[in-house]
Image (cartoon, grey):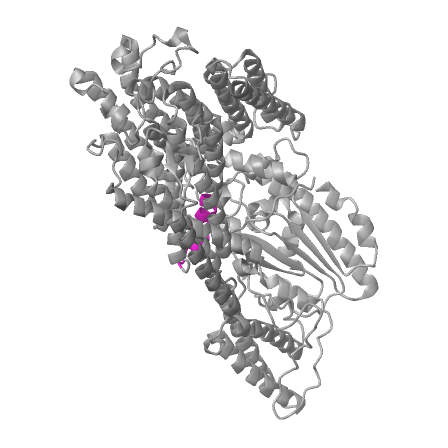
Amino acid sequence: MRLGSGTFAACCVVIEVLGVALFLRGFFPAPVRSSSRTEHQAEPPAPEPSTGASSNWTKLPPPLFSKVVIMLIDALRDDFVFGSKGVKFMPYTTYLVEKGASHGFVAEAKPPTVTMPRIKVDDNVTRHLDKVLKRGDWDVLILHYLGLDHIGHISGPSSPLIGHKLSEMDNILMKIHTSLLSEERENLSPNLLVLCGDHGMSETGSHGASSMEEVNTPLILISSAFERKPGDIRHPKHVQQTDLAATLAIGLGLPIPENSVGSLLFPSIEGRPVREQLRFLHLNAVQLSKLLQENVPSYKKEPGFEQFKMAERLHGNWIRLYLEESTSEVLFNLGTKVRRQYLDALRTLSLSLSRQVAQYDVYSMLVGTVMVLEVLTLLLLSIPQALSSKAELEVPLWSPVFSLLFYLMFLVLSALHVIVCTSAESSCYFCGLSWLMAGGVMVLISALLCAVVSALAKMFASGKLLSKNPAHPNSRWSELDVVILLGTMGHVLSLGASSFIEEEHQTWYFLVNTLCLALCHEIYRNCFLGDDCEPRRCSHGERGFVNTAPALQDRSIGHDELEPHRASKSPTSLNTLRGWEKWMAMASPWVILTCCRLLRSLNQTGVQWAHRPDLGHWLTSSDHKAELSVLATLSLIMIFALVQRRCSLTSKVAMALGLLGVYCYRAAIGNVLFPWQRDSKDISKGLIEARFVHVFVLGILFTGTKDLLKSQVIAADFTIKTVGLWEIYSGLVLLAALLFRPHNLPVLVFSLLIQTIMTKFIWKPLRHDAAEITVMHYWFGQAFFYFQGNSNNIATVDISAGFVGLDTYVEVPAVFLTAFATFAGPVLWASHLVSFLSSETSSGSALSHACFCYALICSFPVSAYIILVTSLRYHLFIWSVFSPKLLYEGMHILITAAICVFFTAMDQTNTKS
């Protein structure tokens, strides 16, 4: 069966997405769980240890508190309570921490500090609070306030709105505490109020990584049961966030959750009698030791387990002395020793379980890796056919050899699947799939392997090895080809080091700068060395990385009967440029380098230099709102000037109104000011303004899609298709302008400017082939991903973009908007590539070649990276550095699949079977 190279590449990337998804499911499995009991069985609590005498305490101790109120403030950073902001905006909470009956802790959350997004306007949480507090039909009340997190995502931790929200939370806490105290006077039993946060907030207002600001949260236990003497100064101790579950279970007289890996916060029970303290600690230690036994085969050699057994023996001796009514001094000293031994054991057990909390699903990872590597191998072996002038390749699906090999492989894989799934001791996602789905995956793996074997056999049979140009094996490599090859290999190799992953933006900045210098060398050589080095058809048309016609010839060639008025136009070259145009061509690499340097100063990203001030921080400060407003206005004007030139009149009007709506939206939410405004007190959510822009985005996209369908179905003039593609690109630019924060609008401007410069003064005059143009688009798309301020850190994802124009959380639009805003750089450059190749190239195979090259260059890093993370899965930085990058790569390959499908839809190459 014959397939076009674009269709073939799109199918390969879709299969690669499935393989990466399966690998991710194995790499990020569900945490290990206790298997000692089922949901409907309750194991009796462990009895009190004793030696020589029997203890009568075999039940759970009574609850320490009558009622518990948990006030969870999303994104509550520790310094918001324990720092200067707490003193200023939360005075009542500060008083309780410093002088009241309370215990304060700094609870550490484990990275990645990611939570599911949700919008809940905070008034809805507080609305019925007074009525609920007066009722007596509840034991536990949980209040989850999201406003602080929402403010952080939009404005950052330095926003004046933070102070207002903290003051609001302080007043609510005072109301709850006052109500609980009044109830205690009537019931004579203590209550507990817990103030905590689920994660912190980075300096940009986001979260998801492992910085101190993101993982450190306040945990305050407030109760009249906690005695405090005058002058007793308590500094917050660092604990684990998981310790709260065990503490609440003990406080409510409930069994500790069997899957909890936390240890009891001892200050919460230090006022109880010694026997109760030891009983509580023993229950916690027994629960952790059982969890350790079920998940660690060599649990007896674990230091925590040995410490627990020692503490349990000492505890038994203490019980014997207690029941014998021994002297109080001996009993007190032994009790102190037992308590210290239990606390050490709990700390060690909790640490061991935290390390063992998740197990890798190696089988699912292996299956996913095999699929990805098979796709990459098949793409590499298909280069000679896929990049030929016909842009077609033969896929041997129906040959007898293929069928025999396929059935043998399918039987072997099925047998291996049965063996692995029946002998696996731990849970496996791939084994849990239905036989129909698992069989489908094995059929796919077998088919890919057979295709790889067939391609290898055909290559060795013909005696042809991979060459730069399959049609011209003796063609030499240009300097630009060498730069592209070495740059791609260097980037892939750099993924093996954690420092290079944290600072990957530096790699892409270096690559685009090197690319500009290589282009500068090529332009100057052609300008100053005359005809001897002038680009000829063989230098970029016949040689090239692909065997295609000159990529930038006029489309009138071969279409004279359709476009007679364009038939006389000749291919563009440097010699045909006028004087000022030639000077512009010579200056264009330096202009691009200058733009890139300015963009690097806009957003500091990565880890090493992220704390240093940049232009973006200066612009977003409240003191420079006027400057930001001017910059946003100029940027929106420049965007319109650069985009409108190829749009229809209707799209030009829609674009102008849409960009005006973008500014109105940012003014409505308080980011920028109108000329007649002096401050931004009257702020809103900007729903009307954002939806106004969304309407124009959809209108422009609809107009472009209509033109594309018209050009395909009615076979109208070719210009309709080029206009349609450009309008789709323009609609995406307008959507990006809406989602980008105002200080990032220059990123969009420089992206459009660089594309315009390279189109007019580099790609057309130098007649680069489709493969080289594709790689350049890919490199600049990756660089602009980091120019936006993104990194391989989840905390740099701008979650607020997913709520632009939404009043409540709607999953599908929120996910789409967030993904587009994050990967706007690669998406816009890929969209420009489709528009450019469709409007400027004469070769009907250019889009097929571009699709294949784009799929190939995107497959290299993801294939190499899943092998690297598999080998480094026990690395110290696997969760803080390598795993976030893995998520980015997974999302990137998904977007690449969508781009390749779009390439294929626009491709004019006929698919033959």
- The residue range painted magenta reads 875-890
Q: Is residue 516 above or below residue 453?
A: above
Residue at screen point 23% across, 25% down: 521
Instruction: Name the spot of residue 811 as percent of width and height, x first.
Output: 63, 41
Q: Looking at the image, which residue sits at the far front? A: 400
Q: Is 74 left, or right, of 910 in this rendering?
A: right
Q: Main secondary structure of the magenta part?
A: helix
Residue 399 image offset from top left, x and y in percent: 40, 46
Instruction: Tell me how many marks there are.
Output: 0
Query: Residue 328 in the image: x percent, y percent?
Result: 63, 86
Quadrant location of the N terminus in the rendered image: top left
Give the quarter of the image for residue 117: top right
Image position of 548 (left or right of 730):
left
The quadrant the C terminus occupies is: top left
As rendered, which of 2 and 657 lies closer to the eye?
A: 2
Work out whether 51 lies above or below 866.
Answer: below
Q: Nearer the viewer, residue 570 or 324?
A: 570
Q: Check residue 723 for magenta coloring.
A: no
Which picture quadrant has residue 597?
A: top left
Image point 59% across, 50% down: which residue? 81
